Amino acid sequence: MFGGLDEKGSPCDDLYWIKFDWNHNLKSVSPTLGEYKSNITPDIRLLAKKVEAIGRGPLARSQHAATIFKNQLIISGGRSDTIFTFIRNVALNDLHVYDIKKNTWCAIALYGDIPNSRWGHKLCANENKIMLFGGMNLNSYNDSEVYEIFIGKLIFFLTFIHSFRRLESH
């Protein structure tokens, strides 16, 4: 888990590894059926550990998109109100990769038809590609563009796939 807002409502850049506490959680599951035991209220526990990664991570942000792609956590865009005085915008359009095995951050240079800055968008991945869709910024909603991110050995390439006119109900 990366970023978000802290208890004061400020964006943060913390990175956490979250996993199930299997030993604790198995107490609530029937070993033969693999279902919750009927006579108890399930008590599911997660374990969180803050990760101190190598390299410069993304700027503190919230409402960004994230996905896992080939043992890497991909972080895209988001919102950071703290940057408004510098760039007259709160929306980000950067791309960062956290390599889980190497425990390192890397900022990615974007080439091609680059998406505009946004927050509230989604990323999803399969074995070969990452798709980016939706979101908004201070000027518009970005729900009419889908981007496909091609992964090379050293660079991420973004190519505009499809654009459609948003249909308004009358």
Image (cartoon, grey):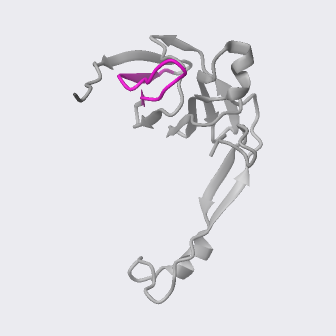
User: Which residue is depicted at the point 63% across and 35% down?
Assistant: 98
> Looking at the rendering, in which quadrant would you find the C terminus?
top left
User: Which residue is depicted at the point 47% across and 90% down?
Assistant: 39
Q: How many marks?
A: 0
67 relative to 85, above or below? below
- Does 7 lie within the magenta span? no
Residue 133 appears in which quarter of the rendering?
A: top left
- Residue 29 position, x and y percent, is 48, 79
User: Which residue is depicted at the point 51% across and 82% down?
Assistant: 41
- Does 149 lie within the magenta span? yes
Boundaries of the magenta span: 131-152
Residue 35 appears in which quarter of the rendering?
A: bottom left
Q: Is residue 121 left or right of residue 83?
A: left
- Is residue 77 or residue 119 the one in the foreground? 119
User: Which residue is depicted at the point 44% across and 11% down?
Assistant: 113
- Residue 44 position, x and y percent, is 57, 71
- Residue 100 position, x and y percent, is 63, 41
72 relative to 21, above or below? above
- Residue 25 position, x and y percent, is 57, 74
50 relative to 94, above or below? below
Please identify the residue farthest to the top as the structure is shown. 112
- Is residue 149 or residue 42 the one in the foreground? 42
Please identify the residue farthest to the front as the structure is shown. 170
Q: Is residue 24 left or right of residue 115?
A: right
Please identify the residue farthest to the left as the structure is shown. 170
- Is residue 131 or residue 133 the one in the foreground? 133
Q: Is residue 10 left or right of residue 40?
A: right
Residue 14 appears in which quarter of the rendering?
A: top right
Please identify the residue farthest to the bottom as the structure is shown. 39
